[in-house]
Amino acid sequence: MRRRDFITLLGGVAAMPLAAPAVCAQQSRPVLIGVLNAASAASTASNYEAFRGALAQLGYVEGRNVRFEYRFGDGFIDRLPGLAEELVRLNPTVIVSSPMPASLAVYKATRTIPIVMLSGADPVGFGLVQSLSRPGGNVTGLTNFAEVLASKQLDVMRALLPGLARVAALVNVDNPLHVPQWRETQAAAAQASLALTHFEFHAPGDLERAFDQFARDKAEALLVPPDTAFNTNRARIVELAAASRLPAIYGSRLYIEAGGLIGYGPNPVENYRRAAAFVGKILKGAKPGEMPVERPTKIDLTINLKTARALGLTVPPTLLARADEVIE
């Protein structure tokens, strides 16, 4: 190469802008992100759309510089350990998991690969992190604090039904989270002087028997706590509640989209969107043990007035005023 040509080429290279780290990553093999969710792909589609969109805004675009391996439990918690081990064998750079049973399964499968919780209750109590402010291991992310929602959900139902005396609850005995959830529900019901009945759920085929029992027990309202099996079968649960004319409150807005009466709980889409920031920092070298676990910033109250009218209920103006969203 002649000296003049070399100088011209060198000047052109010097004038080129520096590429962002995410763009540089396009030139190498895409980063692998493992995904484990105890629910089904269909029931979490909007959540992962928000997660991928938030990652793309950070420069990590699926098919360009990141790729995903998904595993779904479809509501069967006993499948999670095997699915977690499958993901770990793929040696992803980071694994995102939700809810708590999925995070527990991944944590048992690896203590070295970074894990970002998309949601999950009481990570300290379940031993995933040392504290929320200093996790200390390979786990960080977001909590949903589902174990402390029962008392507030009962307050909402009492505002809707001032004469409420007997409440029913679905309990998934295969979900370890439901032990503290059920204790919280019992304490909240006792504090409010409410009679409490429950049904121990094991499989989707139990749902019809559950609502038959609630009818025999003369339940006047139903609490459906956050749970992956319930989320996966939410359309059937909402259908049975309507057929039984049983006012129900759920831990997620997703049930209200399916025709449920009231949803009260953290916004899952927002949690998934916020989790992208954790993943982005880890991909740039941050250590999960030094990244504080975040609590929900907002609890959403959603009311379906169409369902209320079908049940012959009038929602008090004071409760409507508290709602973040009212579906007509």
Image (cartoon, grey):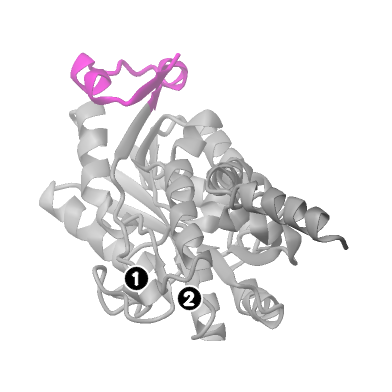
Name above or below for residue 185 compared with residue 166: below
Which disc, if any, is residue 123? Answer: 1
Q: Where's residue 16, x and y in %? A: 65, 48
Q: Is residue 159 above or below residue 308?
A: below
> Hey, which quadrant is residue 295 in on the image?
bottom left
Q: Residue at x 49, y 53 (%)?
A: 276
Relative to 2, is 307 on the left or the right? left
Q: Looking at the image, which residue is at 50% across and 65% down? A: 284
Q: Is residue 117 left or right of residue 183?
A: right
SS for dot 1: loop
In the foreground, 55 or 250: 55
* Comes first in the chain, label 1 or label 2: 2
Closer-to-camera residue (280/20) = 20
Is residue 200 visible in the rendered image? The answer is no
Sort mark 1 into few (<14), some (14-19) or many (20+) by Cα contacts within 10 Å. many
Q: What's the magenta region?
A: 303-328
Q: Which mark is residue 104?
A: 2
Against 281, residue 244 (above or below) is above
Give the distance between the C-alpha atoms of the residues marked 1 and 2, in whole angstroms. 9 Å
Looking at the picture, tell me which residue is in the foreground, 173 or 27.
27
Report helix, strand or loop for mark 2: helix
Q: Position of residue 227 (x, y in %)?
A: 47, 56
Q: Amino acid at mark 2?
A: Leu
